[in-house]
Amino acid sequence: MATTTAPVTAAAHAPAESGTGLWSWITTVDHKRIGALYGVTAFTFFLIGGLEAMLMRIQLAKPENTFVSPDVFNQLFTMHGTTMIFLAIMPLSASFFNFMIPLMIGARDVAFPRLNAFSYWVFLFGAIFLNLSFFLGGAPDTGWFGYSNLTSSQYSPGHGVDFWAIGLQILGIASLAAGFNFIITIVNMRAPGMKLMRMPVFVWMTLVTSFLIIFAFPVITVALVFLLFDRLTGTNFFAPAMGADPVLWQHLFWLFGHPEVYILILPAMGIVSEILPTFSRKPLFGYPVVVYSGIFIGFMGWGVWSHHMFSVGLGPIADSFFALTTMLIAIPTGVKIFNWIATMWGGRLELKTPMLFAIGFISMFIMGGLSGFMHASPPADLQQTDTYFVVAHIHYVLFGGSMLGIFSGLYYWFPKMTGRMMNEGLGKLHFWLTILAMNVTFFPMHFVGLLGMPRRVYTYAPHMGFDTMNLISTIGVFGIALSLLVFIWNFLTSSRSGALAGPNPWGGATLEWAIPSPPPVYNFGTVPTVHSLDPLWAKDGAEISRTANQVRGHIHMPPSSVWPAVSALGMAMLMSGMLFGWWVGIPGLVIMLVGLYSWAFEPCH
Amino acid sequence: MAVADVAAHAAPHEEHPTTTGLNSRKLVFWAFLGSECMFFGSLIATYLVYRGRDQAGPHPHEIFSIPFTSFSAFVLLMSSLTMVLALAAIQRGNQRNGAIWLAATALLGMTFVGGQCFEFTEFFYKGLTLQGNLFGCTFFVLTGFHGTHVSVGVIWLWTLFTMAVRGKIPKEKSLDVEIAGLYWHFVDVVWIAIFTLVYLIQ
């Protein structure tokens, strides 16, 4: 350490905090602010998606209900799935990538701060565009995986599917830009001494997720291009009458769709891999195995897509192959679960709210994993496909898995993000309400599914054995809503008047805990040198914390810029011009070009 | 040495030191090209899956003119050579020659796009349309996206040309040209794949 060179000048040369006005948020390139924007926006869409789910559950509370029409019901389940996957869970994970990754690897920002802002604005405009469909002639109503040829102009004459396809294209650009950014950030921006095998597991899982994003999204982009060509120009990519095969859509969609499943769950697995060691006061058990399992899942995720298509009738060889790969991919997941349990084994457990959510994640994800494993067997899958059993499975892995992992991370890193602690009592109430309500909601779906109740049908006849369990599910969803109200109340009050957190309230081992909460604009006064996997738990932990807060000399931070937001607006307008017409598309093109060129020639130093 | 000190003494256009020692912009471009492989891979795979399924014509062997397309493929391949020469000139600090080779690359690229426009028109008059059969839609969308990539590259090259003419790409900024070159060579390689799989192996 160059302790003799420059004198320690506490924040004298550090950049001042940027303003707080609306303009400062539009032009920000600070990864922490962008993370906050992602978080708030995604949580808002999570509530909208939840509202859609509630309306569906009210409709299904009793047989032959007429609360919503079949048409509206179709729109609700399509938008619920699309919203939760693309507008809630993915961007909530992105919120953690943004806020935490630079802090955990000892960086001042991401590799491309303006590209990062661009990702957020494209995401926001794409999300708004998709939801505009509700007010402009009806939302998409063909299910979140939009099977061909239900999506053809012939069978879906309205504009809902156009909104869906164009909206997903716009959102895909946001995801791709973020994927590139985080790969390079993690590969190239680590603190000195942080070798790959000294990176926190969350950083590893973000890296794997980002690779999945950049390779999976082009595939759905092509599928959506075909769909849009079919709908807008009358081509025949999915028209059986012309010799085309609608199953092509399914292959392209699920070749994207299965890696997408891991895009949704791997970040949550990374989050709990950070939290379990902290609250067990014990390093993660078998760190290399957890990392290798994550990488293995990332590779294997490309070889299982046709298990979504067993009912198509691909033949015994394809079915057997995909059944075997699907069973194989359960192994690294199981390995991780045993590693997490072994981390807790013999540890000094502190059952704080983040830890409770992490344990909840493990137990609920095991249940979702087991029902998923049942789908690996084609004969069993044929019985379960398109029933509520699949709905139960997906909610145990996405709500019980991803969302509990995200809540766990939120409680864990809230003190770092805001400088204040969340209320423990309300947090525990939120946890127990969530666990109880989600099981009341989703567990009965296993039974109605096996009894044969089809998913995506707006009602059911009485006396089929579905009545009671559907009513229980509907009651459960109100419990989830109540738990969310507790969470929102806790979030709002704690961020104003929670107890002050200090730099490391949980005694965490990773670099983000070395710096103040909330972190200064420049994160690290001096980027510390890392010698181990758990730097703050190592002998030189106190020294690392001290170094991280020493400001020496001038710290240069990238200036804010409006051009990412302008480019994003132009791009979204250009693409929505496919639907709205040239009078939106051409101005969009001009705005985008002005934005991109100004961005490219803007000095960034 | 603390990173802050390094940054403080760094020249305005020098990049921060990176973990791998590789430039971040170059690295992200390689990642982007990896992503593009999946994009073109999906388009080409669809073309191959649908090949020979058409009842109605025109079929590929009825309309392809291999000599003509071989010529435009040659033009595009030559543009990779001029791209290499442009980068070499810029890296030596010779912006005048750099500008000439950048212009040559852009002109060759425009010749290729022009050839594609001619080819598309010709095919159209021979009855091949987007809507007519599967060959039409898979062929036009695949080669159309490739042509769009070439066109984006041409705009990029003219932008660099303008900068070089105004003396704004000194040796230290040769990376700007190198990255454009990566893109240009990639688009070229994709054309080799398309030319082989679509035109030559029928």
Image (cartoon, coloured by chain):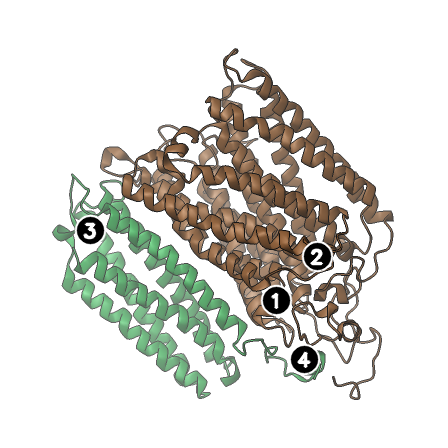
Instruction: Using the numbered discs, state the Cα–Cα distance from disc 4 to disc 1 in whole angstroms.
Output: 24 Å
Q: Residues within 10 Å of mark 4 (few under 14, many from 20)?
A: some
Q: Residue furthest front?
A: A346
Query: What kind of element bears circle 4?
Result: helix
Q: Are marks 3 and 1 in contact (CB under 8 Å)?
A: no
Chain for disc number 2:
A
Q: Which chain corresponds to the colour green?
A: B
Instruction: Using the numbered discs, state the Cα–Cα distance from disc 4 to disc 2 in whole angstroms.
Output: 23 Å
Q: Residue A479 location in percent, x, y?
A: 70, 29
In this rendering, the answer to whether A600 lies above or below A257 is: below
Q: Name the mark nearer the viewer: 4 or 3.
A: 4
Residue A199: numbered disc: 1
Q: Residue furthest left?
A: B62
Residue under circle 3?
B123
Q: Is residue B34 visible?
A: yes
Chain for disc number 1:
A
Q: Residues within 10 Å of mark 2 (few under 14, many from 20)?
A: some
Residue B7: numbered disc: 4
Q: Are marks 4 and 1 in contact (CB under 8 Å)?
A: no
Rendered residue at 50%/46% (across/down)? A261
Q: Residue A328 location in percent, x, y?
A: 43, 50
